[in-house]
Amino acid sequence: DVSLSELLDNHPRLGGRSARASILAIRDALLAPSQLPGAGLASDDEPAALPQLRDSLAGAARLYWAGDFAGLAATLPALIGEGRLTAQAEGAPARSLLAQSYDLAAALMVHMGKEDLAALAAERAVTAAIASNDELLHATVEGTYAWVLLHQGRLAEAEQLAVSVADRVEPSFSAPAK
């Protein structure tokens, strides 16, 4: 029950004991019981303002693209929590930001060799993107989901998803413009 990437030690490390704590914090943010429908576990926290959430997301994306996975791992749990609260309060515009937060979590978890958490984060990203009514974002996070499936060795499913998304978003030059 050990992944090939673990055997080959093919993943970057977050560093020491804090690595495990960071991954556990991301897991806890992804699997928060307060998100269970009908659980009645509301948060007392206040939602973030959209510009503040957008800035936090941009900072997290910069950490990802700079390869600062430790910094990103420290940032993501709060970003996901704020994104959820703000999405509940603000609707579609905040759901777009929440989808992007989940997408970053999925990408980080792939790099850390935690493909099951990556799949969960990618699924949550797809759900939030659908609720945001942003077709391009929806296609983008489905691309992340396909990438996660590749890392899980689920090649046929990854290909089917990628082809399905491409067919859906590909412009048709023979059809009249909408």
Image (cartoon, helix red, strand yellow):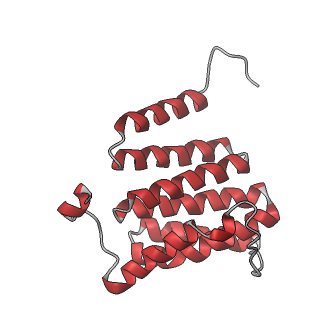
Q: In this view of the protein, which residue sits in the foreground, 123 or 92? A: 123
Residue 76 spot, x, y in % from top left:
54, 72
Q: Where in the figure is residue 60, as x and y percent of width and height?
A: 53, 70
Task: Pick the residue in front: 147 or 43.
Answer: 43
Front residue of this view, candidates 9 and 139: 9
Q: Relative to residue 71, is residue 151 depicted above or below? A: above
Q: Where is residue 49 in the image (x, y as percent from the top left)?
A: 77, 73
Left or right: where does residue 23 sit relative to residue 41?
left
Q: Quick one: which residue is furthest to the left in this view?
A: 8
Quarter placement of the C terminus: top right
Query: Residue at the spot x=49%, y=79% of the render?
Result: 74
Left or right: residue 144 compared with residue 32 = left
Position of 27 compared to 100: left or right?
left
Most extreme residue toward the front is 39
Residue at the spot 57% in from the left edge and 66% down from the top edge: 31
| Above or below for 15 versus 90 | below
Q: In which quarter of the image is residue 37?
A: bottom right
The quadrant in which residue 167 appears is top right
Outermost residue, top side? 174
x 73%, y 22%: residue: 177
Task: Return the x and y of residue 108 as percentages of the image width and height.
Answer: 43, 64
Q: What number of labels is visible?
A: 0
Residue 5 in view in this figure: yes
- Residue 76 in view of the camera: no
Quadrant where the N terminus lies? bottom left
- Residue at horizontal 21%, vertical 65%? 9
Tell me if residue 138 comes above or below residue 98 in the rendering.
above
Vertical comparison of 94 with 158: above or below: below
